[in-house]
């Protein structure tokens, strides 16, 4: 046997031995792949979850969990604060599946996303679209409830009340509307600070800030303007007109800033008070609402947030 033939035979046997000891191939399994994606989702590793859900969809396009995987992709983008991608994912799901459970649920998620983007009008438009295609009263009630909360975010209390009142009698208890109505009735309109009054009071430096319950700012404003006015007065009294003019010019800026700041403080006070009230409502009365999956598209899951 020639050396060349012996060498070839040895190489063949070497490759055969490597193959015999190689690890067996791992077959992709749809259930395991989906659970792997769910694992990342539950851990809050949303970007990894997106990749695994997309892998699942690519390898198992005929699985009955594809719609859920696509919904989870949108939800992962939403939770990962990539809002535009979330909207695109939910829009694509709606376009593909129309009126299935997760498609209807996507309307709510799109609305939530636009609220986070502070695009309240767009959020309301999506909910109105949901109302036009809602197959039953359960889903319409859910849409009205969500619309009410969007109006609350906008500070439009009466509009919010109208939406909550539209909810059918059989679902009012489920949405905890009795307590919500009581809280809205007792606490609105919210007593705030009048920006015009704050500006007028600021003619006396510090008084506008004191009206807005900002004592430190009031003290600083009064002290700073007082010092500048006194310095300008002393300069003019000592015939230092140029210096007095410069100080007076700077004081005019400080004085105008004092008025502007007082008006802004009133707006900030009102905004903070409204936000605190809204957080209180969310903590004590808001229901977490979601439509369940494709086989139960007309059902609702509700849970209430309680504080202890």
Image: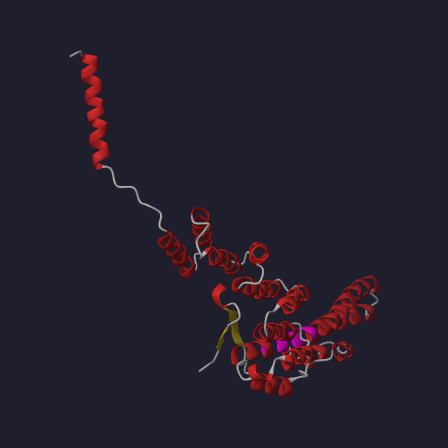
Instruction: Name the residue nearer the viewer: 279 or 27.
Output: 27
The quarter of the displayed image where residue 27 is located? top left
Residue 273 drawn in magenta: yes
Q: Is residue 126 visible?
A: yes
Quarter that holds the C terminus: bottom left
State which region is magenta. Answer: 267-276
Instruction: Name the residue nearer the viewer: 255 or 284.
Output: 284
Instruction: Name the residue nearer the viewer: 297 or 75.
Output: 297
Measured from the top left, where is residue 175 in percent x and y? Answer: 55, 80
Q: Is residue 219 visible?
A: no
The quarter of the displayed image where residue 21 is located? top left
Residue 289 drawn in magenta: no
Measured from the top left, where is residue 208 in percent x and y? Answer: 72, 78
Measured from the top left, where is residue 81 in percent x and y? Answer: 54, 58
- Magenta segment, prevailing SS (helix, strand or loop): helix
Measured from the top left, where is residue 4 in percent x and y? Answer: 21, 13
Instruction: Name the residue nearer the viewer: 56 or 80.
Output: 56
Indicate left or right for 296 with 112 as reference.
left
The residue positioned 38% from the left and 52% from the top of the image is 30
Indicate left or right for 122 with 69 as reference.
right
Quarter that holds the N terminus: top left
**Relative height, residue 254 to residue 183 (above, below):** above
């Amino acid at each position: 046997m020639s050396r060349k033939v012996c060498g070839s035979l040895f190489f063949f046997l070497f490759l055969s031995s490597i193959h015999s000891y190689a690890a067996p191939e791992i077959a992709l399994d749809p259930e395991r792949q989906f659970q792997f994606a769910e694992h990342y989702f539950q851990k809050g590793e949303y970007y990894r979850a997106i990749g695994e859900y997309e892998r699942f969809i690519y390898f198992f396009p005929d699985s009955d969990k594809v719609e859920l995987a696509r919904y989870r992709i949108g939800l992962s983008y939403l939770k990962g604060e990539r809002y535009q991608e979330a909207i695109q994912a939910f829009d694509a799901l709606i376009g593909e599946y129309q009126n299935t459970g997760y498609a209807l649920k996507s309307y709510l998620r799109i609305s939530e996303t636009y609220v986070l983007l502070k695009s309240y009008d767009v959020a309301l438009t999506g909910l109105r679209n949901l109302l036009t295609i809602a197959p039953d009263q359960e889903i319409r009630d859910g849409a009205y409830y969500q619309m009410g909360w969007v109006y609350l975010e906008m500070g439009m209390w009466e509009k919010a009340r109208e939406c909550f009142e539209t909810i059918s009698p059989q679902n009012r208890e489920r949405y905890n509307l009795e307590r919500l109505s009581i809280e809205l009735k007792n606490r609105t309109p919210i007593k705030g600070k009048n920006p015009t009054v704050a500006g007028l009071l600021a003619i006396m430096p510090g008084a506008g800030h004191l009206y807005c319950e900002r004592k430190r700012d009031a003290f600083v404003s009064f002290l700073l303007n007082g010092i500048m006015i006194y310095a300008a007065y002393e300069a003019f009294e000592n015939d230092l007109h140029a210096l007095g003019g410069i100080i007076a010019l700077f004081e005019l800026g400080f004085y105008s800033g004092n008025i502007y700041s007082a008006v802004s403080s009133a707006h900030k006070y009102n905004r903070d008070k409204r936000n605190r009230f809204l957080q209180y409502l969310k903590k004590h009365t808001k229901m977490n609402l979601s439509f369940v999956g494709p086989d139960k598209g007309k059902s609702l899951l509700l849970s209430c947030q309680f504080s202890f």
